[in-house]
Image: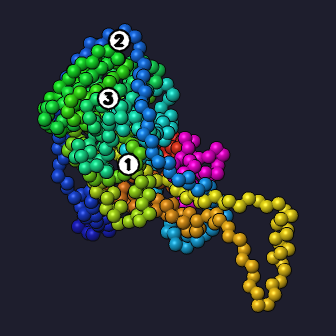
Amino acid sequence: MNLLAPNPAKHRRLSLYFWGLMLWCFSPLAVSAPDLTATPMAQQVLQISNSGAAPVSLVCPRKGPSSTRPSAPVAEPTEIPDDDEVAQALQEASAERTAPTALAGPRLQGDPRGWRIAVWGDSHMAAAFFSDQMVRQLIPADATVTSRFVHAGVGHGGVRALVRKTCLSGDWGREMAYAHADAAAAPGPGMTSLVAKRPGATLALDLRDAQGLARHNRLQILHHGDGAGLTRLAISVDGETETLVPLEPAAGPSAMVLETRVPLSTLQIRVVEGGFRFQGLKLPETPAPSASALHLDLFAYPGATMAGWVRSDLGYLASWFTDQAYDLALIAFGTNEGNDPRFNEDAYRDTLSRALSNFRRVFPQTQCVLIGPGDRGIRVAKSRATKRPKAAANAKNQTSKKQVPKGKAAPKAPPQTAKAAPAAQLLKYARIHERIGQIQADLAAQHGCQAWSMQNAMGGVGSAYTWARKSPALMAPDLIHFTPAGYRELANTFMADFGLTKP
């Protein structure tokens, strides 16, 4: 064999290698971003010798009467469009639609048992129906699920956190990085903040587990240091005597390390003086989960968009995650972006690309899956007409058959309330969600992620109406969110699609 003779197979392999290398070099991931340095986090230690004499239940104080607001006008009753109207809308839209992006055999690397998982998202993830079903599929019922963070969205309606109960006085304001500049400049781990409006603002948390047992005698109270050193807090554990604590004059991400003599049941924070931006709690680090355990941190918040990942100070955000890395991150946004009837695809693509680049700077090695929004329907005005008696209907038919004398106009029919919006409008938001899912699929691969669409899992555009009519219903009455059964169905499909459970 002549070793100097050309080898076509080898030549093809080298050619493929060369072009693959060129594609990688000019891909977004290959463009080297500046190394991210986490902002140093300041810590101060507070030790409280609680007695642990008796279990303490958290009792929220009664709130005063709510301020009287002018009553809103009564909304016109609405209903789910009937099957014929939805079929007409689908038929009219079919000629314009493009085929959805196909996801070929998505798979995740490694055995998911023992994984550390983080979830960022909007209201679809905040209530935890989806993630709870994932956990049921991944580990035995008696296995341990651990978490590190209680983010500052705690106490908000629709947010499930690692607390049994939350009491908030009316002296707090909520700020989110996607919408507030101050929250973006000082983002907590969930990119949300609770900001004290005035002295006296009080937050109380019942930190016992689901069995009512106190587990922790060490945790961190995460907050923003303004550098002024003018803030004083009163900290109470298990309803016992308050301890007055002046915050150290540090600037940037800060943590008060609270150590108690025995595991604490409840924690109360009261602002005595100065400003205070609460970022959440960080619970003790757990050993690497065993094969039968799982670690899950839930950072979802109603109304959230991917813009939080664009606007947040990345060095500040990274300061909360300098210890153990996540194996998997689920990034579930898109419903709120698609709520804008003037949705602009180019603007969304640009925002999502920048957000994913920033995510990769904070979590360069974490596997990630973008979860696209589900299908969305539109309720229509409910018909005021009721079914007429058969005799009346026959009388109308006989009248309609009478000939109109020449020269006379036919009598006008009585006005009737339109039952439905134009057929095209029934799929207005569904089509936007379809485009969001396609854009997510396009950009996910460019940033080392995978993509999965709730809308595709439901059956595609228009499936919200089908899910709403199932028994039990899988779609909530607003045709945007899902029932608990609907979220469980989506989670089961997600797990099957990624080969984590049997289809």
| Residue 87 against residue 34 in the figure, above or below | below
Q: Tag 1's secondary structure?
A: loop
Residue to which mark 2 is pinned: 52
| Residue 332 against residue 267 in the figure, above or below | below
**Label 3 or label 2, whichever comes before in sequence order:** 2
Q: Which span is picked out in magenta?
A: 458-486
Report the side of 462 relative to 19 (left or right): right
**Label 2 or label 1, whichever comes before in sequence order:** 2
**Residue 83 in the image: x percent, y percent?**
66, 60
Tags 2 and 1 touching, CB below 8 Å: no
Q: Tag 2's secondary structure?
A: loop
**Residue 118 in the image: x percent, y percent?**
36, 40
Dividing the picture into quadrants, the one containing residue 151 is top left
Dividing the picture into quadrants, the one containing residue 171 is top left
Most foreground residue, 171 or 264: 171
Residue to which mark 3 is pinned: 202
| Residue 458 against residue 14 in the figure, above or below | above
Which of pointers 3 and 2 indicates the residue nearer the eye?
A: 3
Residue to which mark 1 is pinned: 304
Most foreground residue, 328 or 304: 304
**Residue 149 in the image: x percent, y percent?**
33, 33
What residue is at 79 percent from the left and 61 percent from the top? Answer: 388
Instruction: Name the amino acid type tagged 1.
Output: Ala
CA gap, disc 3 to disc 2? 22 Å
CA gap, disc 2 to disc 1? 39 Å
